[in-house]
Amino acid sequence: MTVTATSVDQSDQLQPRRASGARGRLLRLVPAAASALCGVLLYVSFPPRTLWWLALPAFAGFGWVLRGRSWKAALGLGYLFGLGFLLPLLVWTSVEVGPLPWLALVAVEAVFIALVGVGVAAVSRLPAWPVWAAAVWTAGEAARARVPFQGFPWGKVAFGQADGVFLPLAALGGTPVLGFAVVLCGFGLYEAGRLIAELRRDRVVRRAAAAAALLAVAVPVAGAVAARALVSDSAQHGTATVALIQGNVPRAGLEFNAQRRAVLDYHARETHKLAADVRAGRAPKPDYVLWPENSSDIDPFAYPDAAAVIEQAAKDIGVPISVGSVVERDGKLLNEQILWDPVKGPTQTYDKRQIQPFGEYLPLRSLVGAINKSWTEMARQDFSRGAKPGVFGIDGVKVGLATCYEAAFDWAVRDTVTHGAEMISVPSNNATFDRSEMTYQQLAMSRIRAVEHSRTVTVPVTSGVSAVIMPDGRITQRTGMFVPAYLVQKVPLRTSTTPATELGVLPEIALVLVAAGGIGWAIGFGLRARRAGDA
């Protein structure tokens, strides 16, 4: 009986241990789940939602899961954060080509965020670690914007802040400074909460640490408030009345290119409608008209019927039209904007410089063809890159051009302003991506660019959303999606430059150096601690 009783007692004692083991395994999953959920939270902060402030708790939570972790744990946690963020953000890339390219893109881009996670974990042991950690994030974005295949900056934290209080910082140091401030504030919120919660620590040390953490929150907010002085929508070189034409497309998807003549006719028809409304006094006469990218996929230099359609529209409205076309010249395929004068015909051109990999050209063509031959058939010939910044001189007004995908790249917008642009146009074609969030994400980029360079930005799009954006980032007019429409508005022309325009890439370089310094310090600190432990 004694042995039996002892056996029962031991069995009973094992139950809590088993429960504790299961609970321990579940607890170990908490950081992984939290990291992925924080990534999702960051995605939710992006347009078309106006929940920009969710980026702060997203990075506060990311700081919590990473602080003090080993590099292996941080790598995995960072990757999960990247998946939670990028999987929903970039789902639009699967609209026409299926899930495989989308998943491949996310898998590669999330690697950058995983490496950022390692860097954040490393510097989290340093004094004032939110500063170092935010710089590490900025360095990761800088890398993503450049490699592979000349980079993919989609998903920069700055692009989710078009409606936020931090927006004026874009005029101070561009997207790197804006994004840095948001991430710093998020990490700072976590650190402030952590230190204030540790009430048992030495009061002097606690207060000093808490003050440093609060400064990580207060300084970005104060900086944003101070930077509002850089934001203005006043005219400096008069005004221009500009018209945007959204002709719509026969149907969404890649197949619409098979109906290129219909797309051209739709944009001409909407321009004729505008001309009739001008004559009837229902609309003001524009100084020039902006058509979107791919508004004429028929090369007007090669096909007289396409040239005739454009010429008739220009003569009817009586002012120059900037036409987006696909042109073959000297054996090269070009995504080109053509300025078509009602009297002189085509007078100026701009060839898109930052062309889209796997959209306008196929890297690794043989490998892609081996995976799916239909993808190579859709892009039989790669587009070539332009070589010069896009600035059209139209009756004394300089209009900068950044075609569609180029709006995501800091340099491609900035150099239109450094070459004299008094306003910027971002002609785009989003019909391929149907009604996905891609359109709204790209529109938010244009709002950031407006503030960054203190310029009016117009966004003429084939199928929507077309918009007029003031230099302070406000949208004053916009169309719906997949409807024919035109917008006419008098906009301010500006000639002054912001600190962001003047400094260019320098703020980003400075933050990358800060990140490198922090990581170097963390490595040195770790080596010294290890030697001390060995001793």
Image (cartoon, grey):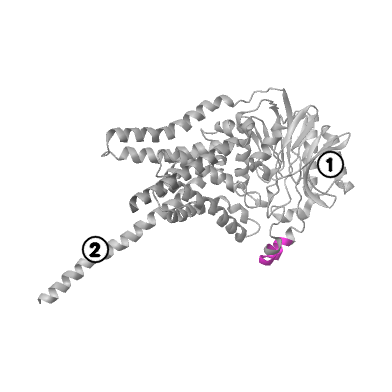
For label 2, the SS is helix
Left or right: residue 532 compared with residue 252: left
Left or right: residue 320 compared with residue 114: right
The residue that label 2 is drawn on is 16
Q: Is residue 452 above or below residue 119?
A: above
Q: Is residue 81 magenta?
A: no
Q: Is residue 371 magenta?
A: yes
Q: Which residues are magenta?
A: 368-376
The residue that label 1 is drawn on is 310
The amino acid on which the numbered mark 2 sits, given as a three-letter code, is: Pro
The amino acid on which the numbered mark 1 sits, given as a three-letter code, is: Ile
Quadrant location, the N terminus: bottom left
Report x, y in % for residue 310: 84, 41
Report x, y in % for residue 481: 65, 44
Toward the left, the furthest residue is 1
Q: Residues within 10 Å of mark 2 (few under 14, many from 20)?
A: few
